[in-house]
Image (cartoon, rainbow, N blue to C red):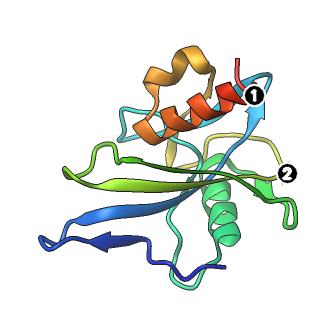
């Protein structure tokens, strides 16, 4: 329920902070990640908020678009906020990644935006974008990832 913009700009006009929201889903000690067709690193299902959209609505929409599942209203839990250098963006750009868990309906499958689904353990962290690596570290410290 936030009206925070999806990014802010520095004097040159390039984004300095990207606000992103993600769904965190762990099965058998591994984290669900996605790779878009045009990306070299793994990310979490999720994306940016549209104007007037709540955090939960944005995560639900982006997750449905990327991995074909419907997140259940009332089951969202904010579990982390990561601030990190944004991968594959102009120098100085950072990402603020707000991470949620939620129960879901449907079968996880790559949708049109996603070229690959991957189940990531701690040993696979180098395949992930920097913010996702930070989350992998955090989840590993909490004993949730193998």
Instruction: Please tell me how crowded label 2 is: few (under 14), some (14-19), or many (20+) other residues with Cα within 10 Å.
Output: some
Which residue occupies the foreground of this view, 82 or 30? 82
Q: Is residue 99 above or below residue 4?
A: above
Judged left or right of residue 96, residue 62 is right
Q: How many marks?
A: 2
Q: Residue furthest front?
A: 141
Q: Residue furthest left?
A: 12
At a point 85% along the width and 61% down the height, the residue shown is 72
What is the quadrant of the N terminus in the image? bottom right
Residue 57 position in % (x across, y down): 68, 71
Whole-angstrom CA distance, mark 2 to mark 1, is 17 Å
Mark 2 or mark 1, whichever is nearer to me: 1
Residue 26 position in % (x across, y down): 75, 33
Q: Secondary structure at mark 2?
A: loop
Q: Is residue 35 above or below residue 103?
A: above
At a point 60% along the width and 19% down the height, the residue shown is 122
What is the quadrant of the C terminus in the image? top right
Residue 143 position in % (x across, y down): 75, 24
Which residue occupies the foreground of this view, 84 or 55? 84
At a point 65% along the width and 65% down the height, the residue shown is 61
Q: Which mark is residue 28?
A: none
Residue tagged 2: 103
Which residue occupies the foreground of this view, 47 or 16? 16
Residue 4 position in % (x across, y down): 50, 78
Q: Is residue 136 above or below residue 2?
A: above
Q: Secondary structure at mark 1?
A: loop
Instruction: Please tell me how crowded label 1 is: few (under 14), some (14-19), or many (20+) other residues with Cα within 10 Å.
Output: some
Residue tagged 1: 144
Which residue occupies the foreground of this view, 47 or 83? 83
């Amino acid at each position: 329920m936030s009206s925070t913009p999806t990014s802010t700009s520095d004097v040159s006009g390039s984004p300095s902070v990207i606000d992103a929201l993600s769904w965190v889903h762990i099965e058998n000690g591994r984290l669900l990640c996605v790779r878009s067709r045009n990306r070299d690193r793994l990310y979490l299902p999720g994306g940016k908020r549209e104007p007037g959209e709540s955090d939960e609505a944005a995560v639900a929409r982006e997750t449905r678009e990327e991995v074909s599942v419907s997140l259940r209203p009332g089951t969202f839990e904010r579990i982390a906020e990561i601030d990190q250098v944004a991968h594959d963006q102009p120098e100085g750009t950072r990402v603020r990644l707000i991470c949620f868990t939620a129960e879901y309906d449907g079968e996880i499958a790559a949708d049109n935006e996603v070229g690959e689904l991957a189940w990531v353990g701690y040993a696979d962290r180098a395949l992930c974008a920097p913010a996702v690596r930070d989350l992998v570290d955090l989840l590993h410290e909490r004993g949730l990832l193998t």
